[in-house]
Image: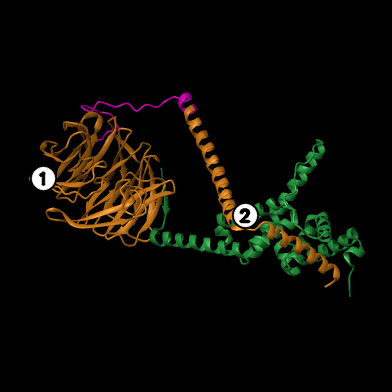
Chain colours: A green, B orange
Amino acid sequence: VSIDARVAWHRVSDDSLASSTADDERDSAVQALFVAHYDNLRRLAFILLGDADAAEEIVMDAFAKALSRWRIFKSVEAPAIYMRRMVINGCHTRHRRRKLEDNTLRLFQRRSERVAQWDADVSTSSLALWSAVKQLPMRQRTCVVLRYLDDLPESEIAAVMDVPLGTVKSQLSRARRRLAESLGPESFGGDKP
Amino acid sequence: VTHGDERIRAALREIGDAYIAARADPVSRAATRVRDAQRRRRIIRFGALGAAAALVVGAAFVGARVLPQREVAPTPMERDDSPTRDGPAAEIPVGGPPISLAVTDDGSLWVGLAEKSSIVALDGASGGRQSSVRTRFPAALLATDGRTVFYGNPEVNEVSQVEPDPVTASGYGYPATAMAAGGGRLVFSAGPGMGTGCGEGSCVHSVGLSRSGLTSDELVFAVGCCPISAVAVDDMYVWAAGGDGRGAGVVRTWLDGEEKHRVGLPEAPTDLALDGDTLWAALPKAKSVARITSIRDDRPRVQMMRTDVAVSRLAVGDRFVFGAGTDGVVVKVPRDGVGLCSVVANIGGELRDIAVVDGFVYVAATSRDAVVRLDEPH
């Protein structure tokens, strides 16, 4: 018949003030993050996927998530690492979906209509190496890109990928070996002491 | 660092930098993409809400067609010996559909009429008609500080005051949607659409009262209820009830509008009734009334009391709080919150207001063009 509840008067003025301050804080924090990391993140996504439009979409999705989940995001200790992780997860999801699409196309004997979206003037040797990097499994590829493109130490790569340090070391080692195998010791240059 | 490492680094950077250079102007594209992403999410969310709403409406429609209907039939009021009613009822014709009631300290019951610019005064003890006072517009809202009667109308941009003789009036430029008097002030809410900088219907207008009524001492402050559905006032606080889809409740503030505190309720109350340290709130959609105790403390207690009928107006009696609403039923709710709510009388039609005077419960029965009087149960 009746439900009892002990409640507290909720300060309206303070809360509305806090909410407007929180909005300002959110906008300026995400804006600063955008200015500082947008180019690096989309470059990372592009190197991983090789798809310019998808790279930008994934990075912008990550920023949109940061805005919409600000309550969670603001408590993150290292926002840059968190953003990288979101972008990498987005790339992995896109990669999985693309593999599925490719398999489906192959199954029904249809040709992919995917067209080149980027045609920059870069050296053929760099394109050959990038092509070899794109042949790596996604995990090894991510380690390589974070290590060489973003210059992250192995410990930070482990934090971004949320894996143990040993995994990063072994993945990097395997990736280097596979790259040397696919490009040839001459082209890859071999290890110098 | 090996030569191979340097080679990978140089190649990836060359490609990455070329990509960034080839696709400059990220900011405008970025802004568009953020907007697109947010729009997509909004569409998905509203789509889901729309689907849920359609499902609920469909289920309600099917339920209404399939399930047997429960009818609340009005009962005759001249002699009603039904066991639910505690005392005999009488009908007092007032010359039109009554819509608002107020009780002054001298025991008079003031009745506002829906279609006529006049207020009828009744003797609360006998129910006899005392006088009729012409007003500037139909008094949809009535409030009194015990001495002077004030009236307003949600369609008229002023509040005015009534005295038996002469009638004086004072306009304030805002249509009142809820009104109350007490603590030396008349408080009322701004109607929707009146630009006051506080948002639609979210402002409380507070006017100082003297022995002769309204003064020029006027305060306007926002309370954050959008829009305000009911107000109450005593000599310390103003309580404003309201809410919309974002949340409903009661906001307590000092008489000058400082220090606003809010307590949440399941819907915007349609009426508030002060009862010492307790505030009663009518919640017709929930078919309940909320009994909010310790209202001047930091931690009030909210007790939801189920009435099983829609109660939109409240009046405090000796042992019970009485409620009336669109179901045409008068209910009594124990003031101490102990025990059940029960039906006092089934009058039928829409009951627009309720008041308690000298041991009688008066109800504005719009469909009967009369005020119905019941014995206050003991």
Report which quarter residue A70 is drawn in. bottom right
Q: Quadrant of the N terminus of chain A?
A: top left
Label for residue A54?
A: none
| B157 relative to A39, above or below | above
Name the element at disc 2: helix
Residue picked out by circle 2: A60
Q: For the residues carrying marks 2 and 1, which lies nearer the camera in this image?
A: 2
Residue at left 33%, top 47%? Answer: B281
Give percent across and percent down for residue A187.
89, 63
Magenta segment, which residues?
B62-87
Residue at left 84%, top 65%? Answer: A173
Front-most of residues A47 and B298? A47
Q: Are the residues under marks 2 and 1 on the same chain?
A: no
Q: CA distance from mark 2 to mark 1?
A: 67 Å
Front-most of residues B159 and A4? B159
Name the element at disc 1: loop
Give percent across and percent down for residue B83.
29, 31
| B356 relative to B296, above or below | above
Q: Viewed as shown, does residue B296 lie left or right of A123?
A: left
- Give neighbour class at mark 2: few <14, some 14-19, many 20+ (Cα, 10 Å): many
- Give neighbour class at mark 1: few <14, some 14-19, many 20+ (Cα, 10 Å): few
Residue picked out by circle 1: B167
Q: Is residue B154 magenta?
A: no
Q: Amino acid at mark 2?
A: Met
Residue at left 23%, top 58%? Answer: B235
